[in-house]
Image: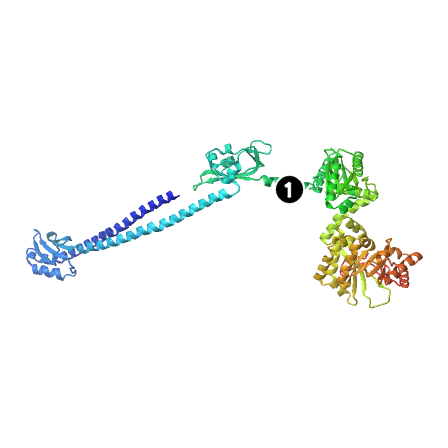
Amino acid sequence: MPQENSQLTDFISKLSMILSLIVGLSLPIGYAFVAYNDLSGELNFKVKIKSNSQSELITTMPDTWMYAENRIQGILKREPIVLENEFLQVYDSQGDLITSSGHPVDSLKMIRSYPLYDIDSIVGRIDISKSLSQLIANTLMVGLFGLILGFMVMVVMRLLPIRQVRKISDQLFEEKDRAEITLHSISDAVIRCDLQTNILFANDAAETLLERPFEQMKGLPIADVLNLRNKSGDRHPLVIDTVLATRAEASCEGQSFLDVNNKVVAIEERAAPIFSHNQEMTGVVLCIRDVTIARNYLEQRSWEASHDSLTSLLNRRAFEQKVSKAIERSKQGKHRFVLCFMDLDRFKVVNDSCGHAAGDELLMQITQLMESQVREGDVLARLGGDEFGLLIDGCDTTQGELICNEIVDQISSFQFFWMKRVYTVGISIGLTNITRDTPDTSAVLSEADSACYWAKENGRNQVCVFLPSDTELAANRNQSHWVERIESALKDNRFVLYQQSYRSLNGDQTERLHMEILLRMLDESHALILPQFFLPAAERYDLIQQIDRWVIDKVFADFQQLTDEYQDCSLMVSINLSGASINTGNLLPFIESKVAQYGVDPCSICFEVTETVAVKNLLAATVFINECKTIGFKFALDDFGTGVSSFEYLKKLPVDYLKIDGSFVQNIDTNQIDREMAATINRIAHLLGKLTVAEYAESEDIVDVLDTLGVDYAQGYGVCLPKPLFNDSYKISL
């Protein structure tokens, strides 16, 4: 680059000198030429005028005019052209001087002549001369100015262009230097080749990747340096060849591997042509990226997407894909398959008492045990938690049942040792056939799941075969079909609220109007579905928490509209909560956020929990109830009297209302035992400072008996039929 700058500087210097000489010389020469022509024309004009002025004299005195010197002098002086430093001389035809006018010129001068005519004959001539001293002086002045101007041109041309050229040259040099530094700094290997694929340049990353210095690679064909292989180990063509053939960018197709000193590196290669300013291809640049880590990461992620990280078995998603393919093959009549849904028994005991580390170790040992019992072509998967799936190829129900029973026996006899303690577990297995009539993956998994659930319900640690003719199994399977419908209803907001009011039996007309919120679901055609059809499925498949939150949000959001419809009385609105919601630990913050969002008075809301839910996790229920009561909410204990230790737990639960179970109320007008049970519950509740509500008050006779016993409120069809919560909402009463 410095040598190129010096050559360019010399050229510009020479050019500036030539231009300055041209400017310095052309200016005086041009001036002298123009001034000389102007002076010549001026003298020709004057001498012609003076000659014409003598014509009259010559015509009058053709033979003697040359002797009339005084008259000639007079004519020369009085004619319109005045002489200015010119010297006139008049000659006769023999060339003798007749007379002159003006001052003779001794220096370098210009002379112009014009003949004197007598009609058509020349009888003499007039010469006019003028000194060239002034023209020479002016030319010298102009020459001096030209030299100054030429010098200025030379200075300007030498300084400005050279500085600019140097600046541009320096910028180009810096740009080239930065480009080379960048190429050497990037992590991708960059190699530049000529049209014969000989290597011209390689950056530091290329030297590192190929484990060879550039000096050893320079000038070599790139095929001698790059040893590319495909996944099967065969020679892989170079992408540079494609670029040379197509004159366009190209990248490798498929996976390429670079063999460097018996070390395999996964790479991605991309090449592009290099064109000159006239669009002629001069070479190719190749970019090679080491993607070994990225490709290993993607393979690991792909494996993780289809496998369980703990047991290395297939996960649910991959297992469902295997089941789907098995269904397709069965429809073609080529294979028979048996699908098994397996759920460990007593796994929760180990996981809760010994911790998750013990639970994980148990799952891994159980996995190894089950793998030893299945054939190589069978598919074993972990579906989640302590649930496993098994797809047995080429078996009917009888053979599948034998395999499953062997698994049950092996796991039943298995002992798990942890911290010097021994644990045993069992396994419940549901089994179903995959046939050409199997509709889809969801249906066959539902069949196996239902059979497994039935195996647990009937004693655990056994195998249950799904039979479509078994009505109880079919009913249990049908429950799983509600999951999709419930999720769809939640998504489409196809739940509606109903209410059933209480009747106060203490005669206090200032008492609040109590009402219990009831839930209905709308199907796809907007027909009402009663809760007994969908709530059991919601509880089993962990959808009940979403339903509880939907109800809370809906009631709180529309509470102001509800109070506007019942302006004549204050309200106490009861909302049922499930055990799953209470035990989550995050329901209270949700309720508090909704109170803040909608500005609901907590004193107007009463939450209901069943006795079974409260007793099942007494500590959690007690903590939750106390926290809600601190805010201002009321609580009711629903279905009281069905538990074996109802009165013992009643003392520990800080509820405000006690709802007597309907089994003691629906025949209270005819059954003395039910009447005494209801009376006892009512009396003890009052001793504990709690108000009582009797459910299933289906007639006025029952209401009268409840009034006689001193029950505070009656609820049932005999008091109020369920009706839409809002007057402008769904109008069907159930």
How many numbered circles are shown? Answer: 1
Q: Quadrant of residue 315?
A: top right
Q: Position of residue 138 (x, y in %)?
A: 21, 55
Residue 283 appears in view: yes
Residue under circle 1? 301
Q: Identify the secondary structure beneath mark 1.
A: helix
Name the quadrant of the N terminus: top left
Q: Is residue 562 left or right of residue 28?
A: right
- Identify the residue at image location x=47%, y=44%: 179
Label 1 packing within 10 angstroms: few (<14), some (14-19), many (20+): few
Q: Is residue 222 left or right of residue 511?
A: left
Q: Quadrant of residue 255?
A: top right
Quick check: 508 above or below 383?
Answer: below
Quick check: 262 above or below 384?
Answer: above
Q: Is residue 483 left or right of residue 254?
A: right
Q: Amino acid at mark 1?
A: Arg
Of 378 and 243, nearer the camera is 378
